[in-house]
Image (tube, rainbow, N blue to C red):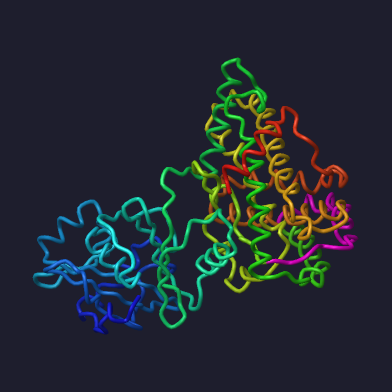
């Protein structure tokens, strides 16, 4: 944002007094209850392009140990009431004749902010906020550009902005093109990208495939994933290829190291200890696996990774798969998310997502159907995990980022899948206890299956979608 677009200005005292109550109502607020005190760390007024009879204010405020970015629209109260209709959570407060509210719900104010954040390089006719995020707020402009306003500020470069920009600079074609980056004092405050109009996230596509399969089974139709109309394997193969391309681009942008090699023994020991804490009845069964993991001779290079890779973080459009949101696992400290590691951290995340989806879809079905549907559910997850790995392993150049020999490669993959399953179990027990049975079943499989079964190399798919179709990814996605 060009400094000429901002004029330093203190927030009205009456506005500061109501910010605590406003913060407490927001999804992105990290505290519990209303903060006892809110301090303004910096504030300004957008100086140009703001609608008449209104002001657009920006501020960074401190509440407890956290810092937040707020964008405030100020309008005459009668006009503000119209803008706030259906957005009660956006109201901040009033003082005599004016009302303050979150500017992202006001299309004219949001457009004015876009102009300012881009230094006048971007403009739009209309804006609409999205409401699904926990720690940010995104606004779509003209179905052309999506601007993410970072709410919880940690200081410094935001990982999503940094990695997306770096990947785009390598020529990696599967991130939405960066269009706006607004920083102050080295901290990323807003980031705008190409809006992927008409895209569908991978989780929704997987559930559609599974619903088609389950519906076919229940009605007496084909009950094999390869024979159902919604077979997902071709998409899983393409997704594996794009994931490999992402890791190759990460290595080009950030380089590689051998940091994991020096930490591998400690990593495996920590896995075994955590398994004993989370699933003590199963931990003894896992002794052969942990012994095999300690015998791994080469764990492969360490590289910067996505860090929170699953079906909800990828989107399919008419031009191929796109990867979203490089901020990493939100429950891990930022410094941990930035540490280079094995590419199998991302691979295992996607594999676990492909195993989660069938269990999620089963919960939508009647209990009496489960005996019929559980075998095709297992077949679906095995088929698509296999397809994803085949697409990943067969990509030119990915071998340089993998452990060698292949037996060690698969052992490292299993270690990271186990790590992810235990992370899921801790999360589900804390936030969704009814879902804990899904990662518990994953732990039972990983700890009790024979090691040679877990580490078997993926073979060709039965009912393979075909080499010609797989080759289409070169024309469609690049």
Residue 344 magenta: no
Between 368 and 215, the one lying in front of the other is 215
Q: Is residue 351 above or below residue 334?
A: above
- Identify the image quadrant of residue 29: bottom left
- Identify the image quadrant of residue 344: bottom right
Q: Residue at x 33, y 64 (%)?
A: 122
Residue 434 in the image, given as x and y percentages of width and height? 56, 45
Residue 269 in the image, given as x and y percentages of width and height? 81, 65
User: Which residues are drawn in magenta?
Assistant: 278-303
Name the side, left or right, on which 129 lies relative to 478: left
Q: Residue at x 55, y 35 (%)?
A: 363
Residue 410 in the image, given as x and y percentages of width and height? 81, 51
Q: Residue at x 11, y 69 (%)?
A: 53
- Identify the image quadrant of residue 389: top right
Residue 88 in the image, given as x and y percentages of width and height? 25, 56
Residue 286 magenta: yes
């Amino acid at each position: 944002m060009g400094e000429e677009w901002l004029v330093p200005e203190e927030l009205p005292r009456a506005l500061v007094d109501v910010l605590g109550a406003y913060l407490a109502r927001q999804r992105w607020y990290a505290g519990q209850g209303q903060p006892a005190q809110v301090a303004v760390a910096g504030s300004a007024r957008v100086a140009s392009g703001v609608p008449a009879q209104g002001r657009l204010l920006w501020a960074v405020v401190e509440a407890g140990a956290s810092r937040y970015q707020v964008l405030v629209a100020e309008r005459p109260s009668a006009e503000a009431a119209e803008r706030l209709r259906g957005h009660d959570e956006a109201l901040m407060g009033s003082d005599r004749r004016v009302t303050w509210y979150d500017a992202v719900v006001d299309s004219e104010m949001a457009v004015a902010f876009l102009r300012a954040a881009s230094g006048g390089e971007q403009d739009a006719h209309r804006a609409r906020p999205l409401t699904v995020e926990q720690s940010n707020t995104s606004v779509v402009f003209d179905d052309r550009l999506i601007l993410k306003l970072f709410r919880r500020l940690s200081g410094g470069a935001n990982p999503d902005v940094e990695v997306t920009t770096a990947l785009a600079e390598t020529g990696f074609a599967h991130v939405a093109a960066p269009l706006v980056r607004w920083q102050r004092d080295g901290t990323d405050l807003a980031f705008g990208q190409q809006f992927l109009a008409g895209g569908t996230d991978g989780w929704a596509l997987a559930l559609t495939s599974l619903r088609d399969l389950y519906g076919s089974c229940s009605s007496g139709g084909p009950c094999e994933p390869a024979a159902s109309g919604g077979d997902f394997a071709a998409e899983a193969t393409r997704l594996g290829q794009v994931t490999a391309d992402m890791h190759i681009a990460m290595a080009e942008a950030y380089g590689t190291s051998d940091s994991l090699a020096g930490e591998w023994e400690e990593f495996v020991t920590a896995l075994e200890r955590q398994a004993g804490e989370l699933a003590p009845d199963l931990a003894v069964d896992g002794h052969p696996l942990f012994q095999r993991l300690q015998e791994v001779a080469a764990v492969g290079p360490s590289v910067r990774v996505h860090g929170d890779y699953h079906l909800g973080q990828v989107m399919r459009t008419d031009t191929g798969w796109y990867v979203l949101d490089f901020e990493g696992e939100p429950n891990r400290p930022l410094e941990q998310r930035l540490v280079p590691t094995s590419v199998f951290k991302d691979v295992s995340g996607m594999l676990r997502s492909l195993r989660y989806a069938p269990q999620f879809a089963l919960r939508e079905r009647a209990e009496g159907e489960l005996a019929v549907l559980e075998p095709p559910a297992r077949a679906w997850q095995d088929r698509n995990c296999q397809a994803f790995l085949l697409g990943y392993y067969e990509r030119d150049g990915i071998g340089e980022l993998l452990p060698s020999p292949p037996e060690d490669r698969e052992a490292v993959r299993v270690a990271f899948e186990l790590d992810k399953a235990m992370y899921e179990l801790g999360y589900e027990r804390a936030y969704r206890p009814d879902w804990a049975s899904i990662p518990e079943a994953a732990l039972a499989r990983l700890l009790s299956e024979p090691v040679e079964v877990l580490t078997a190399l993926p073979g060709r798919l039965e009912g393979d979608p075909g080499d010609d179709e797989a080759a289409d990814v070169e024309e469609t996605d690049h």
